[in-house]
Image (spheres, rainbow, N blue to C red):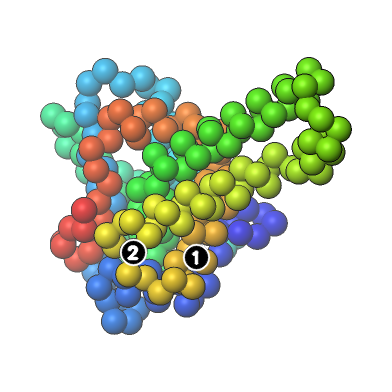
Amino acid sequence: MSEHGIIKVPPRVVRATFASLGFAGLPELSTVQLVIRADASGFRLRSFGAYLHLVDRFYGRQDTRGLRSYAQRPWDQLELSEIRLGSIELVVSAGLDFVSQHHLVLTWILLRGIPHAGRAISQAIGHFASAYHDYEAGRLARAQRKGLEDTSSQEGVRRALRATVREFLETDPHFRDMDPGRRAELARLLAEAYLAEDEQLRAAREFAQTHVHSVALRLDGNELP
């Protein structure tokens, strides 16, 4: 991710991502849709809104002009193309250009990893908060204090998150056979995206874990669960 918070995916990772989804090269797709199915009852509006906001921000961070520019261009922003009631089914369609299609594919991957990433961030932050409390209370030895002072909690969260995202990709049926080097690059990109949205991610995690049944991808009408 750049200094401006843009998710910049190298072409080699784009090719490896689509190879993991069953394409020999960069596909020419007519339709790419993100399909979110969720329980329609008993959810908090705040967590539901946070989840939808996170979908939009994950997509917007892939804009080469940056998230702020994306937010100022309504004509380029994601739109819901369908809402089906009962259980809620939200359908988001990408444009016909390959760039917006790949952005939606990466957004799908990011959404699949929310339960894992949200848990990792919460656990890591909790660990460092506890360590800092011990430090303040004077219960750490001098050497431990120095180690704590020299260790950035942000770096600790980043390391924990990268490890969790790598594990998520290694066990996900769509990416476990991906080239290990490309998968590691993808894991770093996802981890940086989650960190950039850590507050929003924690707010959206409740809805993702308790109400979202599935986040699927439709490529030319064929659904990947």
CA separation in Å, label 2 and label 1: 11 Å
Expressed as whole percent of the image width and height from the top left, the position of residue 17 reads 38, 69
Q: Which residue is depicted at the point 19% across and 66% down? A: 220
Q: Which residue is mark 1?
A: 184
Where the N terminus falls, by quadrant?
Answer: bottom right
Residue 95 visible to the viewer: no
Expressed as whole percent of the image width and height from the top left, the position of residue 174 reads 29, 62
Expressed as whole percent of the image width and height from the top left, the position of residue 225 reads 21, 53
Q: As displayed, is residue 197 above or below residue 134?
A: below
Residue 90 visible to the viewer: yes
Which corner quadrant of the image does residue 18 belong to? Answer: bottom left
Q: Which residue is depicted at the point 50% across and 65% down? A: 184
* Towards the viewer: 105 or 129: 129
SS under mark 2: loop
Q: Which residue is mark 2?
A: 176
Q: Left of 17 or right of it: where is 185?
A: right
* Towards the viewer: 141 or 218: 141
Q: Left of 16 or right of it: where is 68?
A: right
Q: As displayed, is residue 62 above or below residue 126?
A: below
Expressed as whole percent of the image width and height from the top left, the position of residue 201 reads 49, 37
Q: Left of 173 or right of it: where is 115?
A: right
Q: Which residue is depicted at the point 79% across and 36% down? A: 144
Q: Which tag, 2 or 1, sits closer to the chain's start?
A: 2
Kindly give the residue lying farthest to the left in the view shown: 86
Q: Which residue is depicted at the point 34% across and 78% down? A: 26
Q: Amino acid at mark 1?
A: Ala
Residue 39, disc: none
Q: Left of 118 or right of it: where is 173?
A: left
Kindly give the residue lying farthest to the bottom in the view shown: 25
Give the class, few, some or many, for how many residues have Cα within 10 Å of label 2's Cα (few <14, many ≥20).
Answer: some
Give the class, few, some or many, for how many residues have Cα within 10 Å of label 1's Cα (few <14, many ≥20).
Answer: some
Q: Amino acid at mark 2?
A: Arg
